[in-house]
Image: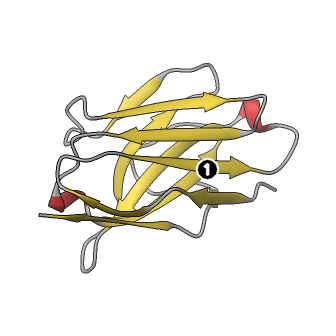
Amino acid sequence: HVQLVESGGGLVQAGGSLRLSCAASGRTFSSYAMGWFRQAPGKEREFVAAISWIGGRYYGDFVKGRFTLSRDNAKNTVYLQMNSLKPEDTAVYYCAADHRVVTTPHWDYWGQGTQVTVSS
């Protein structure tokens, strides 16, 4: 069982940056793929980014080089650096863990989410 706790969300102006963190419990963190999804009000949960257990990175089409995903296995933490934020990036961002990467929200473990609000 894996527990995930997100942090780093907040309010930022358009063009600004935020770094989200996701801390995971458990001693087998390095064997998990880690992902980020987001969900805006009235919309479906959307794939943002994922990193496999061997470090392969995958990004949603809308990211277009603005976000960077990294992981620190020594700290059981994954980071999502978000730059050039736009108002349409406003959503609750969720961290997820599983043993494989898929771009649909069918992951085994989820965090509680952290709100990101981008003002225009």
Q: Nearer the viewer, residue 74 or 29?
A: 74
Q: What's the coloring here?
A: secondary structure
Q: Residue at x 75, y 59 (%)?
A: 3
Position of residue 37 measured from the top left corner of the image (x, y, whole percent) = 42, 55
Q: Nearer the viewer, residue 47 or 23?
A: 23
Relative to 29, does residue 97 appear above or below in the rendering?
Answer: below
Callout 1, which amino acid? Answer: Cys
Q: Nearer the viewer, residue 93 or 60?
A: 93
Residue 83 visible in this rendered orientation of the protein: yes
Q: Is 113 left or right of 29, judged from the image as shown?
A: left
Q: Residue at x 61, y 63 (%)?
A: 111
Disc 1 crowd rating (10 Å Cα; few below 14, some 14-19, many 20+) is many
Position of residue 97 measured from the top left corner of the image (x, y, whole percent) = 62, 48
Q: Quadrant of residue 41?
A: bottom left
Relative to 70, does residue 88 appear above or below in the rendering?
Answer: below
Relative to 91, does residue 54 appear above or below in the rendering?
Answer: above
| Count of marks placed on residues | 1
**Outermost residue toward the left?**
120
Q: Quadrant of the N terminus?
A: bottom right
Secondary-structure class at tag 1: strand
Q: Quadrant of residue 52?
A: top right
Position of residue 28 measured from the top left corner of the image (x, y, whole percent) = 83, 37
Position of residue 79 measured from the top left corner of the image (x, y, whole percent) = 54, 39
Residue 99 visible in this rendered orientation of the protein: no
**Outermost residue toward the right?**
27
Residue corresponding to mark 1? 22
Q: Nearer the viewer, residue 82 or 39?
A: 82
Q: Quadrant of residue 120?
A: bottom left
Relative to 44, does residue 99 appear above or below in the rendering?
Answer: above
Q: Residue at x 60, y 31 (%)?
A: 71
